[in-house]
Each structure stands twice: as C-alpha cells, then as structure tokens.
Amino acid sequence: MRTSNQPTGKSATVEVRLAYKRMIWIPLVGVIDVASSTIETPEEVADTIGRALQHVRHDKLIACTNCGLAPMDRHVAEAKLRALVAGAALADRRYPA
C-alpha cells in the first residue's frame, strides 16, 4: 500500500494493488485537523464531507483524520474521533447516496 498527498487540501489517496494487477483509488478525506487541539463540530465535519462529495462518489469516500492523533492529549483525541463519527453520520443524512 502506498499513500500520496493530493495538491488540493486535506485529501489523500491510497493505491491498492490487487493480485490481478488492477489498481483501485480510494479517496481519503482528512476531516479532523490533528495540528489543532480545537475539537471540530459534527456540522464542520459534515460540511467538509459535503465539499468532498462534490468530487467523489458517496460509496467511494472515506472520512478520516488528516494524520495521526498520537501527539495530542487523549481526551482531545477521543473528542475529535467522536466528532468524526457524529459528523459522518450527519453527512449520511444530509447527502444520501
């Protein structure tokens, strides 16, 4: 597996090579900023997902953090992950497939 940053914003793609040599591009969208201890709201997360859905099919998008959460306080990291889950659920309701 190889990751590469895209030039536009917080998104990245993961190239997965299957046994039969076909490549699949899976868009990952960083909806949680790990460089800040500010906890995103579910609405902010859903808005970011909504902007990404203008460019990526609903069934192909994976919302995630924009990097690792290890350097932050545990309570902040957990709150950010809760916001990610709540925001993804909100985006599912706002932007049905």
Image (spheres, rainbow, N blue to C red):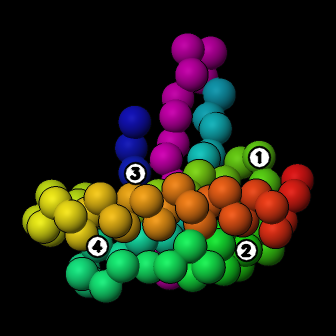
Question: How far is mark 3 from mark 2, CA to CA?
Answer: 23 Å
> Which residue is farthest right?
97
Question: How far is mark 3 from mark 1, CA to CA?
Answer: 20 Å
Q: In the rendering, at what x and y percent does residue 73 appear?
A: 13, 67
Q: In the rendering, at what x and y percent does residue 92 appear?
A: 76, 58
Q: Which residues are magenta?
A: 6-21
Q: Residues within 10 Å of mark 2 (few under 14, many from 20)?
A: some
Q: Residues within 10 Å of mark 3 (few under 14, many from 20)?
A: few
Give the residue displayed 16% in from the left and 60% down from the top: 74
Mark toward the viewer: 3 or 4? 4
Closer to the chain start, of discs 3 and 2, is: 3
Q: Is residue 4 left or right of residue 28?
A: left
The amino acid on which the numbered mark 1 sits, given as a three-letter code, is: Asp
As rendered, which of 48 and 39 lies closer to the eye?
39
Q: Are marks 3 and 2 in contact (CB under 8 Å)?
A: no
Element marked by disc 2: helix
The amino acid on which the numbered mark 3 sits, given as a three-letter code, is: Thr
* Residue that mark 2 sits on: 50
The amino acid on which the numbered mark 4 sits, given as a three-letter code, is: Val
Question: How far is mark 1 from mark 4, CA to CA?
Answer: 25 Å
* Residue that mark 3 sits on: 3
Residue 91, picture quadrant = bottom right
Element marked by disc 3: strand
The N terminus, quarter of image: top left
Closer to the chain start, of discs 1 and 2, is: 2
Q: In the rendering, at what x and y percent does residue 49 appear?
A: 65, 70
**Vertical arrangement, residue 39 with respect to residue 56, above or below:** below
Q: Is residue 67 left or right of residue 12?
A: left
Q: Residues within 10 Å of mark 4 (few under 14, many from 20)?
A: many
Give the residue displayed 40% in from the left and 51% down from the top: 3
* Residue that mark 4 sits on: 34
**Any part of residue 28 in sight:** no
